[in-house]
Image (cartoon, rainbow, N blue to C red):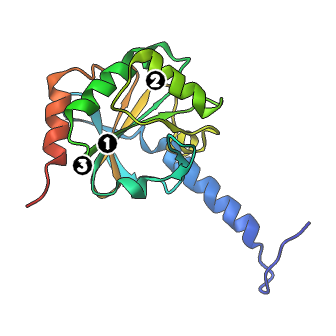
Amino acid sequence: MEIKDGSGRFPALSMCLAVLVFVCVMATAHTAKSDEKIGSVFSKLAKPFPAPDIAFKDTNGKPVGFIEFRGKVVVLYVWATWCPICAIDMPDLDRLQGKLNSKYTAVIPLSIDRGDIRFLHSFYKKKGIRFLQVYQDQDSILAAVLGIRGTPTAFLIDRSGIVIGVSEGATDWNASGVLRSLKKLSRPEK
């Protein structure tokens, strides 16, 4: 089936190609890290980019996007319940969120688990997680656009919605430099 507009072009094909190019660019974006660190955890990206405008599910299974977090510094932590490192990190991230002012900073633990979101609620209860909200990228669309190579991967997003840092693999979320740098980044402008 061909889809043509009045000009004889193929807008659907053009749109698909544009999305494919965007995914390819984003998939390699976080590999371009500089040697510079942000705090003690994140490698500063050589080429920061806007957080993708792709919805994921909130704790109630409703769509949410990064626009809702504009004005806050965001730690986007892409994880899964089957990831042993992630299971260790989640309580640490929960404590970190508890120490941060949620008015200025948000830790978004984005699960790529394919199961029902209620399973994530059970995981949180079992781990004693109190401060973090449940978020899910059930089809791993956002994870694919961001070019996640494995779990866990964390991104640092500034108040204007720009992804400025990345951390792949095991991370010491209890390190004093993490809390200090997030508080400094999220300090309200005067």
Which badge, 3 or 2, is on the more N-terminal residue?
3
Residue 63: where, in percent of width, then height? Answer: 55, 51
**Residue at which label 3 appears:** 103
**Residue at which label 2 appears:** 124
Work out whether residue 38 or residue 62 is closer to the camera in this orientation and state it: 62
Name the residue type under label 2: Tyr
The answer to whether one can see residue 179 in this image is: yes
Write the residue at 51% across / 28% down.
121
Which circle, 3 or 1, is nearer the viewer? 3
Secondary structure beneath dot 2 equals: helix
* Mark 3 closeness class: few <14, some 14–19, many ≥20 residues within 10 Å: few
The quarter of the rendered structure image containing the C terminus is bottom left
The quarter of the rendered structure image containing the N terminus is bottom right
Residue 73: where, in percent of width, then height? Answer: 27, 47
Q: In terms of image quadrants, where is residue 29?
A: top left
Residue 177: where, in percent of width, then height? Answer: 15, 28
Name the residue type under label 1: Ala
**Residue at which label 1 appears:** 106
Which circle, 1 or 2, is nearer the viewer? 2
